[in-house]
Structures are given as C-alpha cells and as structure tokens.
Image (cartoon, rainbow, N blue to C red):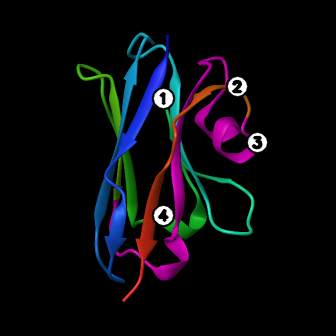
Amino acid sequence: QVRLVESGGGLVQPGGSLRLSCEVSGFASGGYVVGWFRQAPGKAREGVSCKDDGATFYKDSVKGRFTISRDYAKNTAYLEMNSLKPEDTAVYYCAVGMTSWSSTSMCTRSIGILYWGQGTQVTVSS
C-alpha cells in the first residue's frame, strides 16, 4: 500500500520560512517523479514544484523562494519555502507520478500522477 504523509505546515508571518516534508512508503525510492501542489480557497489546485531525475520545475511565482529536494535514502521529499507571502496561503499536497512523464508535465498538466498525500495547511499572515 502506497502512502504519502505530509508534515511541516503551519502559521507563519510574511517573510518567514517553512519546510514541508513528504514521506513516501510502499513505493521504491527513485521510482517516481515527485511534486508539490497547492490549492487556495476558491481556486484550482496548481503545481508549485516538481522534480524528476533530470530536471526541476518551479512555478514562476515561487522561483528563487522555494526549493524542492529529495532524500532517496529516506524516501522523502521536501519543499523549503522562504520569503513567504500571504498569497502562498493554501493547502499543500505532495504527489508521486510516473517516471515516463517529466517534472514539467506533472506540474503544469498534472499528467502521470499516481498518488496524492492528504495535504498540509500553510497560512501566511501577520
């Protein structure tokens, strides 16, 4: 059984930082593309950052502020978020997808996604 468990969300002031974690079990490490998505109230879910073995995609609005990484030994993905803004407020989800699709395809068109995590709330507010 595949499970994705996110953690690390919370309330942070504008300009602050958070690190989200996504622990994957039941799926061989390195055998998937991993991505972070978010959904704000009243808005569609959007791809924030995705990473395959060769490339990394970032949504324009988070470039230079967010960093995606993977620890293959721990089978865990991370999203380091710095200089957070109120517009970053959303439920953040991690997802794993087929390696036959690129990180860009996964993030921009949600193609090849196999499993989703349950989501973690990130609120940026003073």
Discs 1/3, front: 3
Discs 2/1, front: 2
Mark 2 lies on a secondary structure that is: loop
* Alpha-carbon span between mark 4 and mark 3: 18 Å
Q: Which residues are magenta?
A: 81-110
Q: Position of residue 98 (x, y in %)?
A: 62, 19
* Alpha-carbon span between mark 2 and mark 1: 17 Å
Discs 1/4, front: 4
Q: Position of residue 14 (x, y in %)?
A: 36, 83
Residue furthest to the bottom: 126
Label ID, residue 40: none
* Relative vertical location of residue 4 with respect to residue 41 in this rendering, above or below: above
Give the residue pinned by disc 1.
54
Asked if the residue at tag 3 contacts the one at tag 4, i.e. Cβ–Cβ closer than 8 Å, the answer is no
Identify residue type, mark 1.
Gly
Identify residue type, mark 2.
Gly
Mark 1 lies on a secondary structure that is: loop
* Relative vertical location of residue 98 with respect to residue 81 in this rendering, above or below: above
Q: Earlier in the sequence, mark 2 or mark 4?
A: 4
Q: How busy is the neighbourhood of tag 4: few (under 14 within 10 Å), some, or many (20 plus)? A: few
Give the residue pinned by disc 2.
112
Label ID, residue 63: 4
Discs 2/4, front: 2
| Residue situated in front as seen by the camera: 15 or 42 | 42
Mark 4 lies on a secondary structure that is: loop
- Asked whether, in this view, residue 99 is left or right of residue 83, the answer is right
Residue occupying image coordinates x 37% and y 53%: 67
Give the residue pinned by disc 3.
109
